[in-house]
Image: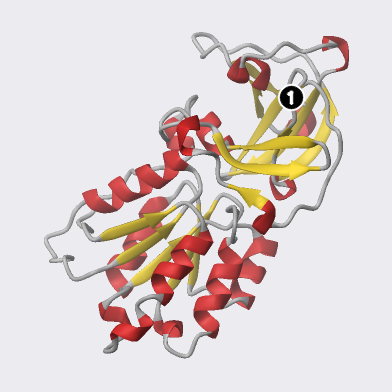
Amino acid sequence: MVGQQSFGINIAKVTEIMNYTPVIPVPDAPPEFEGVFTPRDTVISVIDLHKVLNKESPDKEHDLLVVCHFNQMDVGFHVSAVKGIQRISWEDIEKPPAISGDGATNIATGIAKFKDRIILILDFEKIVSDMNRSAVLDTSGVNATTNDKSDKHIVIAEDSPFLNKLIVSTLNEAGYENVVHFDNGKDAWEYVKGHVDLGGDILEHVSCVISDIEMPQMDGHHLTKLIKDHPVLKKIPVYLFSSLINDQMRVKGESVGADAQFSKPQIGGLIKHIDENV
């Protein structure tokens, strides 16, 4: 809860929930960035979701910190309360209506209906990026090459409108102009599957698929498995590019047939791999 409204975060991002603790302010930081604190010798940055979402805490003395680890960093989100953990299928999470944002400002990646509540799934990568863009997608070392890449057809599945645009533009800068992008795994699957009847070598139609893991309608693991279980589409390299890549998630990705897995924000390694293998 932030104020009186319910929001959601993937539990895979969460490492700890703790009572709010005073933080050390950082000079010249954005107002949403409260500062840092160091529990158990780990430096954790704290972002106040009340300021991000323009909400007021009803009982500041009982506020909490949701401590997360993603994009190879530790972040604490200052919230009003935590109501619990609920298991919700990705199929039951809808895309936000198009009128709710243009991708540059919208910080919701999904809408989940649970009992009598509507829960917005927040785009935590974008929230962090507004504080530090390179923390979400580090484009250093990404350079265009002289090789002709016009025959490479890349499919992107990424639910964050902000990251979706940024990944596409980064690939364009690297020389990959033929990029098709979707905001969920289901639409990406329908697009890829639609090339089966065209005949010929499937790699002439789809050179590779780059997919996030957590997405509404269909997650990246399910998308990968569908592609790798298909007798024709299984030739297509599938690369998982997610803030959730860790030892456990890596095993899961390997089990569904992912050809390689890359952790955000290091897109340079992903593009280098595509340059050398696609």
Question: Residue beneath label 1, please?
Answer: 5
Task: Compare residues 25 and 149 and report the one nearer the observer.
Answer: 149
Please identify the quadrant where the N terminus is shown.
top right
Residue at 23%, 61% in the rendered image: 178
Residue 76's place in the image compared with 201, above or below, is above
Point out residue 173 in the picture as x, y percentages from the top left corner. Answer: 22, 48
On the rendered image, what quadrant is the C terminus found in?
A: bottom left
Image: 49 above or below 163: above
At 41% from the left edge and 32% from the top edge, which residue is drawn?
A: 102
Q: Is residue 230 visible?
A: yes
Give the SS element for disc 1.
loop
- The x and y percentages for residue 248 are 70, 63
In this rendered view, identify the residue nearer to me: 176 or 225: 225
Q: Say left or right for 45 vs 61.
A: left
Residue at the location (83% across, 25% down)? 81
Where does residue 132 sit, x and y in percent of width and height? 47, 28
Quick one: label 1, few (<14), some, or many (20+) residues within 10 Å? few
Q: Is residue 160 above or below residue 249?
A: above
* 249 left or right of 194 in image: right
Residue occupying the point 37% across, 48% down:
167
Q: Is residue 237 visible?
A: no
Would residue 21 be found to the left or right of residue 209 on screen?
right
